[in-house]
């Protein structure tokens, strides 16, 4: 790798880290306006996005970021080996697409921005282009350096397949789920309204170890860590009508202020839910989980 390429990789590392840190402070998502001028450690700012979807800054050798959306004309497809198929712009192989292919040739890391709502995105960094197919106008992305060399899905060993699935959960599904939940609940606990995102979890109603425990917003709740733990251990339940209940034995227990204010006083409190109907927790899933709570 030339010194110029090394310098570019270092610049990308700084920008990628700045984007991820900004998103982390908000619960996992970043806004369109923030992406226009991401603050960097040296006091400068960097534009990271364009309406065209592929951003090629003039002072970079190759593409810096790509934007994707499940609502777009071509949804990304996750392949068996944990890599992602991304459809790039139709038309000439010049312009933006030329720099996209150059990023593959040079092995440069990119920022992947997944749109979760108009003006809101989940960043993934680093992402590498491992293959370019000019016939189908697709590139294959690896969301972790360790996935760059994995063979096609049919050639994966069971260990490799398990490893790829785990990385996709960690690097794609979980961050997207968290970002969607934190945005829908405005960065607050649905039980107690605590507003420190660093103390909040994106909790599953149907647990993710269950085949129906999908990382989608109707199966999610924004819970602070104490109420998430209480929910998982059936000290706390939520009715299908969005009412919080506390385990009867716990209500009768006498202990310090944390038990009294943190749990007992939450009994029969209405759950705080998102404004948009489509974002609200699914009542059928809540009913399944509530029955488990009642059963102890």
Image: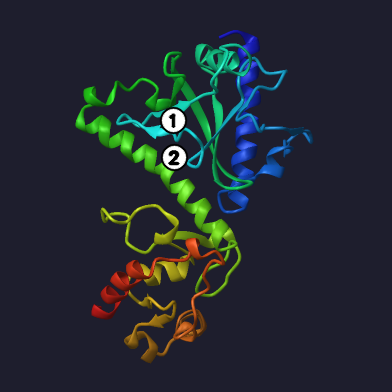
Instruction: Quarter of the image for the C terminus: give it.
Output: bottom left
- Whether 82 is drawn above or below 28: the answer is above
- Whether 185 is drawn above or below 172: the answer is below
> Residue 160 sits in which quadrant?
top left
Secondary structure type for disc 1:
loop
Residue located 30% across and 31% down the image: 80
As drawn, is 109 to the left or to the right of 291?
Answer: right
Secondary structure type for disc 2:
helix
- Whether 25 is drawn above or below 224: the answer is above
Residue located 32% across and 87% down the image: 249
The reply to whether discs 1 and 2 touch (Cβ–Cβ < 8 Å) is yes
**Image position, residue 216 (x, y; %):** 41, 54
Mark 1 lies on residue: 144
Instruction: Kindly identify which numbered label has been placed on residue 153.
Output: none
Colour logic: rainbow
Return the residue nearer the eye: 90 or 104: 90
- Alpha-carbon neighbours of circle 2 within 10 Å: few (<14), some, or many (≥20)? some
**Image position, residue 181 (x, y; %):** 50, 57
Mark 2 lies on residue: 171
Earlier sequence position, callout 1 versus callout 2: 1
Return the residue nearer the eye: 240 or 235: 240
- Whether 253 is drawn above or below 294: the answer is below
Return the residue nearer the eye: 77 or 24: 77
Residue located 26% across and 53% down the image: 211
């Amino acid at each position: 790798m030339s010194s110029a390429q090394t310098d570019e990789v270092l610049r990308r590392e700084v920008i990628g880290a700045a984007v991820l840190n900004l998103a982390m402070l908000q619960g996992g998502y970043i806004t369109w306006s923030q992406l226009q001028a991401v603050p960097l450690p040296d006091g400068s700012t960097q534009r990271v996005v364009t309406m065209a979807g592929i951003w090629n800054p003039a002072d970079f050798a190759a593409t810096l970021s790509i934007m994707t959306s499940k609502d777009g004309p071509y949804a990304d497809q996750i392949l068996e080996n944990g890599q992602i198929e991304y459809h790039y712009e139709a038309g000439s192989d010049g312009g933006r697409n030329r720099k996209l292919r150059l990023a593959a040739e040079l092995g440069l890391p990119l920022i992947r921005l997944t749109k979760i709502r108009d003006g809101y995105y989940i960043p993934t960094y680093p992402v590498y282009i491992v293959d370019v197919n000019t016939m189908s106008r697709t590139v294959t992305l690896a969301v972790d350096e360790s996935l760059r060399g994995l063979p096609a899905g049919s050639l994966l060993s069971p260990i490799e397949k398990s490893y790829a699935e785990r990385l996709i959960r960690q690097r794609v599904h979980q961050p997207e789920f968290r970002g969607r939940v934190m945005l829908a609940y405005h960065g607050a606990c649905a039980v107690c309204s605590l507003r420190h995102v660093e103390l909040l979890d994106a909790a599953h109603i149907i647990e993710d170890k269950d085949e129906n425990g999908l990382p989608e917003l109707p199966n999610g709740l924004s819970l602070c860590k104490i109420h998430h733990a209480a929910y998982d251990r059936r000290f706390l339940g939520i009715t299908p009508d969005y009412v919080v209940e506390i385990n009867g034995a716990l209500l009768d227990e006498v202990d310090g202020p944390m038990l009294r204010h943190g749990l007992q006083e939450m009994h029969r409190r209405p759950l705080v839910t998102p404004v948009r109907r489509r974002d609200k927790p699914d009542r059928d899933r809540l009913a399944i989980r509530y029955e488990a709570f009642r059963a102890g």
